[in-house]
Amino acid sequence: MGELETLIMHPHKPYAFVTYRSEESARKAHVRLNGEKLECRESSVTLYLSYVNSVTCEEEVSVPLPDGLVLVEDFVSQEEEAVLLAAIDWSSTNDDFTAKKALKHRKVKHYGFEFRYDNNNVDKDKPLAAGIPQECLPFLERCVKNKHIDILPDQLTVNQYESGQGIPPHVDTHSAFEDTILSLSLGAMTVMEFRHPDGRLVAVVLPGRSLLVMKGESRYLWTHGITARKFDTVPARGPQSPARTAPDLSACSNLTLSKRDTRTSLTFRKIRHEPCGCAFPSACDSQVAPLAPPPPSPPSLPCCHADAALLEEEYVHRVYDAIASHFSSTRHSPWPRVCHFLSTLPAGAVLADVGCGNGKYLGVNPEVMAVGCDRSSALVHICAQRGFQAFVSDALRVPLRTASCDACISIAVIHHFSTQERRRAAVRELVRLLKPGGRALIYVWAFEQEYKKQRSKYLKEHPEKHSPTEDAQTGSSQEAHGESSIHTSRRLEDLQDATESKLSVHTNRTAFNTQDLLVPWHLKEGKKQVDEESREGERKDETKEKSQKTNTGFGSGLDTSAKPSASGDTTPTCGSALKSESEISAAPVFHRYYHVFQQGELEQLCGQEAGVTLQSSYHDQGNWPSSSMIRKKGGRS
């Protein structure tokens, strides 16, 4: 319609503001577009235009960049950009020369040394024939002169992203590279997300020809990644943020969409030849425990909130992130009674799946507006790949409005909380989300593996003949949802003689002998495959295995009605790897914390919340979960 000056969209508003450079263009747009029906594939929308005198723009809100992170815009000129892009020959067929690879979400080339995605490291004794291109030297010398780096890099990784492509969150391997990492963005603009282990998120807009410098905490501790999408939400206009801050896209009022196009990133690094001695040992692969440590001791039952959070971080959260890919491959069959509950929801109902795992329930009823959340960013990424709406969140503090949901489900989640107070807080948070009259379905593992004289499928017919290898053949014979596990090459069953304060390790396919325990997850030896894309730059072992149905232990489920109330504490969900003996020993084993519920315990837990009525409670005969359904008082019954 004419030359466009700005397009401004306010978050969560169904309108936008358009400013043209001339009154004539604005009149032309109003005449031609007002009432116009726009078609896009199977969707259509009618556009309505109105004149406004002015658009108020609030002051931009900024958040500090991670410590050690610097963004320098326009670091190279357009002419230099063209020279650098021409130096990268994607048409070359000599893959050994530059270790060219076509990954799932982008094209990659390596110079100097190849970064290997099978072990997230470099072979320092095998340099590539192609060193860093000569065309890069003026740029690197300027980086030294401007004190962004102290010494010239010797390794270059070139990534080319088309529209809609990205890279999973990761930390560049400590033992592979020295401190400073340079990333030069060429071509289109994009948004890179930095996330701290405590959950803080900073979205950094990377314009074309900008230089990103990562040092210290931002390089060693924060993960960075690019979400795969075709449009980014970015500030619409105004002065650039100071060098040490980034616009807060969650609070900014003047936003617009930036359509992605081809972007090429040049990441320069210096190979490390000595072990890393950084100040972040929890994230450092050089500072992990030796390969043959003293026998690890199982954790103790938590005695306070802080201990509980650490236990769940170590034995739930980290585990799910570590096994997300393999876990998802074994979670493909929704449970029939959960599907029945979802099918009873009316069209247009709002459903929250708290602890959604890989999202297998989010698409069961296409007539409802379903949104999921999970503590594992890796599982949420899988949900997004499957086309579901999901976000990373703790089950004790879900960032959804109070009384906004017609229904909630919590399938095999609450048994991962390690204290009574935290389990009750998880139920209270579900109640807070429900509208008056809303319903929640809760499933947990049950302590009783026999119900009405019928044994669960989880129990072996002859437990005395139990062999650990049988669990290895089934992947994990007792998973109920987003169960996670701790990677260890040494079986922990030998630790069963621990004192009563220590958590015991459960023997798969046998009856539970205590309510609080560690449950093993066995991987079948020989079936472990590396997922190149999800492992890049990370130090996790993620595996893929053929999808296969697994039997699960009893769980408890409640369909309940609840009264809103404030959520309790934040809950981490992680699991760390205990290593011993050889890295190439038998099939790896992961361990996850569970509190298995005794009969009536889930009902009692839900009954403690005011404004809730228990509608039904049952044992799901197929997998023996204990289940309860609650309804929040008020509204229609």
Image (spheres, helix red, strand yellow):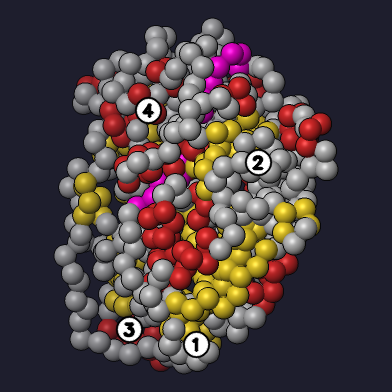
Quarter of the picture holding the N terminus:
bottom left
Q: Residues within 10 Å of mark 4 (few under 14, many from 20)?
A: few
User: Closer to the N terminus: mark 2 or mark 3?
Assistant: 3
Mark 4–mark 3 distance (CA, rounded to whole Å):
57 Å
Q: CA distance from mark 2 to mark 1?
A: 44 Å
Which residue lies under the disc numbered 2?
326
Q: Looking at the image, do the residues carrying marks 4 and 3 touch, with CB atoms under 8 Å apart?
A: no
Q: Secondary structure at mark 2?
A: helix
Marked residue nearer the N-terminal end (2 or 4): 4
Element at badge 1?
strand
Q: CA distance from mark 4 to mark 1?
A: 53 Å
In front of the other: label 2 or label 1?
2
User: Contact (CB < 8 A) between labels 4 and 1?
Assistant: no
Determine which residue is flagged by label 1: 46
Quick one: SS at disc 3?
A: helix
* Mark 4 or mark 1, earlier in chain: 1
Q: Is residue 446 visible?
A: yes
Question: Is residue 89 in view from this perspective?
Answer: no
